[in-house]
Image (spheres, helix red, strand yellow):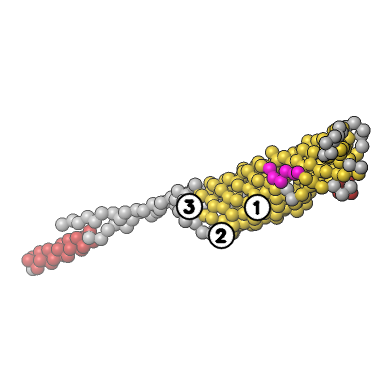
């Protein structure tokens, strides 16, 4: 009977050892992942961005007008058709998805000059020429919409259009008039006899109206927040006019100088500060992985 008890005890111990060895073949359960860090939540939506732009443009003038010259049937034998302008602006926008966004912008344009010379035939061989010179500046507010055409190597080309309001200001105007009379010279040819000059000035004048734009360019995503842009824009600014012209000697008041059909071909560079998540090129956090515990065998 004692031997049977000894055999039974030995068998139980053998079975227990086998079970313990088999259990040691399975890995230990990995520790639970730590809770995610708290997210920064504020009032600014992830689609909102701020922007800033600077650039240079070639501003073109369609035609010049002045009421007294028009009524007298005068012409414009010389005029400045275009001038270089410089501009800077800011804006705020919203990106709806990867291909569509809108923004509102406000910019100031300056450094632009105007100039023209008219000719009025007063009869009796007397001709009056007025040479005008001045400066043009503008404030432009636009609502713009863009279509982003996909991203390749962090570069995103886009097309856009805008519509808004332009306030054009002509200031610093001078009007130098020269009146001359045709005379017959001793050799029978026709020339200009002695004349006299006048000088006029005009106060600043402003004319406002609808402005619109067409745009194309490319953006480069530097990181999850910063996008740099370079682009072309056609901008139609409408018309502009000075204040009324006043003769400095006699005090006569005449109509303002007007410039019609102003537009500009602009090259601009800018930046957008995005409040969104990382896109194609921003640094991305790598997920934390936990390796399973090593397998330990016990014999």
Residue 65 location in percent, x, y? 82, 47
Question: In terms of secondary structure, where does tag 3 sit?
Answer: loop
User: Which label belongs to residue 99?
Assistant: 2
Question: In terms of secondary structure, where does tag 1 sit?
Answer: strand
Q: Residues within 10 Å of mark 1 (few under 14, many from 20)?
A: some
Mark closer to the chain start, 2 or 3: 2
Residue situated in front as seen by the camera: 219 or 238: 238
Q: Left or right: 150 with respect to 286?
A: right
Residue appearing at x 17%, y 63% in the figure: 18
Residue 189 location in percent, x, y? 82, 39
Residue 129 location in percent, x, y? 83, 40
Instruction: Give the CA separation, mark 1 to mark 3.
Output: 26 Å
Question: In terms of secondary structure, where does tag 2 sit?
Answer: loop
Q: Which residue is label 1 attached to?
A: 234
Q: Which residue is label 3 attached to?
A: 154
Does residue 80 appear in the picture of this structure? Answer: yes
Residue appearing at x 59%, y 54% in the figure: 216
Mark closer to the chain start, 1 or 3: 3
Mark closer to the chain start, 1 or 2: 2
In the image, the segment drawn in magenta is: 78-83
Residue situated in front as seen by the camera: 233 or 106: 233
Quadrant location of the C terminus? bottom left
Q: Left or right: 230 with respect to 108?
A: left
């Amino acid at each position: 009977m004692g031997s049977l008890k000894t055999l039974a005890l030995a068998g139980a111990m053998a079975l227990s050892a086998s079970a313990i060895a088999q259990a040691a073949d399975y890995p230990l359960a990995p520790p639970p992942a730590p809770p995610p860090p708290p997210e920064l939540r504020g009032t600014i939506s992830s689609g909102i961005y701020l922007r800033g732009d600077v650039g240079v443009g070639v501003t073109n003038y369609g035609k010049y007008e002045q009421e007294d010259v028009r009524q007298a049937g005068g012409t414009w034998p010389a005029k400045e058709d275009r001038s270089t302008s410089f501009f800077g602006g800011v804006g705020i926008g919203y990106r709806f998805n990867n291909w569509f966004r809108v923004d509102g912008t406000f910019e100031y344009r300056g450094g632009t000059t105007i100039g023209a010379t008219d000719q009025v035939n007063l009869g009796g061989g007397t001709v009056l020429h007025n040479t005008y010179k001045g400066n043009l500046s503008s404030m432009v507010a636009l609502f713009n919409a863009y279509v982003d055409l996909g991203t390749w190597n962090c570069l995103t080309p886009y097309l856009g259009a805008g519509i808004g309001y332009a306030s054009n200001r002509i200031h610093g105007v001078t009007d130098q008039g020269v009146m001359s009379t045709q005379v017959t010279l001793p050799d029978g040819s026709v020339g200009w006899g002695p004349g006299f000059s006048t000088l006029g000035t005009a106060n600043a004048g402003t004319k406002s109206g609808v402005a619109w734009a067409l745009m194309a360019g490319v953006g480069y995503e530097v990181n999850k927040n910063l996008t740099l842009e370079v682009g072309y824009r056609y901008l139609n600014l409408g018309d502009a006019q000075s204040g009324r012209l006043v003769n400095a000697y006699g005090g006569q008041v005449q109509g303002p100088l007007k410039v019609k059909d102003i537009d500009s071909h602009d090259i601009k560079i800018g930046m957008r500060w995005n409040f969104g998540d990382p896109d194609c090129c921003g640094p991305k956090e790598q997920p934390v992985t936990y390796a399973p515990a090593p397998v330990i065998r016990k014999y």
